[in-house]
Image (cartoon, rainbow, N blue to C red):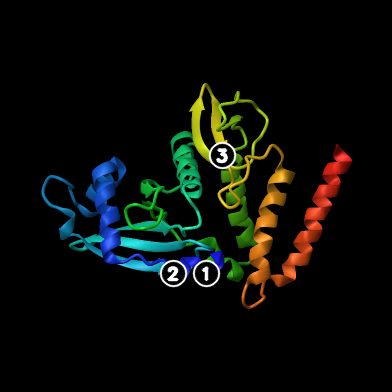
Amino acid sequence: MRESTRYDIQLDNEKAFKIINKSAVECADFRRDLSERIGFEYGTNADTCVLAIDVQQIDNGVVNAVYCLTIKLNDKELKSIVKILPPNWKRLKTLNEVLVIQFLSENVKDFPVPTIYGYDCEGDLIGNEYIFMSKCEGITLNTIYGDMTTDERKHYLNQIVKERSKLSDLKFLTRTCDNDQAGPNPLFGCYQGIEMKNGQVLALIGPNCDTLKGPFRSFNDYIISLIDFRLEDMKIIKNGSLSYFVTKFQRFIEHVRNNNRVSV
């Protein structure tokens, strides 16, 4: 069952060093951070075997296994994140996330995203797809939100709105993988290619990573397909904690479908 898949995925030291070695060879940003943060110069004065590592699982992945990988040399350390995807997702989710993060980093000024050090869309290196990235400074909002005052919550929500507003001026041209003509009408699915060209975002959209259906030309069709897919999981959750939502989501789907017929 997809809900529990992440607990079956382990990142041990052997797999961690495979990820580190691959990125040290392929990623200039990772070599830069190794040099600037811990004084390690890959390929000149040492091999990665001189590094010490510490692997700690972070308990905030919904379906993925998320680890904090700390790389140490003497008294200095570089913290990074390894996100390991369950085997039911094949390529689409990993590629979608990497493309979006890299696009935002390169094209939206001062947008707070991690640096991608490496990724594997095939699962060949450690047996699962993964994304290896820098660890953003600070703590996650969900760990302190419950203890905040209303004014403190407004402060951070305003920050989120400010960052989100940086995306509002982006103008998209989308097309499917069938080599159709790119146009301004939205498509809903997973990114399989994205670039900035002549002031516009050119996006290649493929199927949704969960349902493997799409891309969809309306958000209604997209959300109906996704909820239909998730309903099957909700019905078989062992402790029944999600069964309460099944009827509500079924009513929501019917409402959306009825609205579709009315609008047509």
Q: Amino acid at mark 2?
A: Asp
- Which residue sits at x=63%, y=67%? 149
CB-based contact (under 8 Å), mark 1 and mark 3 = no
Q: Amino acid at mark 1?
A: Ser
Residue to which mark 2 is pinned: 8
- Which residue sits at x=70%, y=56%? 228
- Given residues 207 and 28, the one toward you in this image is 207
CB-based contact (under 8 Å), mark 1 and mark 2 = yes
Task: Give the percent coordinates (x, y) of residue 99.
Answer: 47, 41
Classify mark 3: helix, strand or loop: strand
Relative to 142, does residue 38 appear above or below in the rendering? above
Q: Earlier in the sequence, mark 2 or mark 3?
A: 2
Question: Which label belongs to residue 84?
Answer: none
Q: Give the tally of numbered discs.
A: 3
Mark 2 Cα-neighbour bin, 10 Å: few <14, some 14–19, many ≥20 = few
Q: Amino acid at mark 3?
A: Gly
- Which residue sits at x=52%, y=62%? 63
Q: Disc 1 to disc 3, how far (Cα)?
A: 27 Å
Question: Which label belongs to residue 4?
Answer: 1
**Residue furthest left as drawn:** 45
Task: Give the percent coordinates (x, y) of residue 222.
Answer: 68, 46
Task: Give the percent coordinates (x, y) of residue 174.
Answer: 60, 31
Q: Does residue 255 appear to the left or right of 161 in the view shown? A: right
Relative to 121, does residue 196 appear above or below in the rendering? above
Residue to which mark 3 is pinned: 206
**Residue furthest right as drawn:** 262
Q: Does residue 159 appear to the left or right of 221 in the view shown? A: left
Q: Quadrant of the C terminus?
A: top right
Relative to 23, does residue 172 appear above or below in the rendering? above
- Given residues 79 and 153, the one toward you in this image is 79
Task: Give the percent coordinates (x, y) of residue 250.
Answer: 78, 60
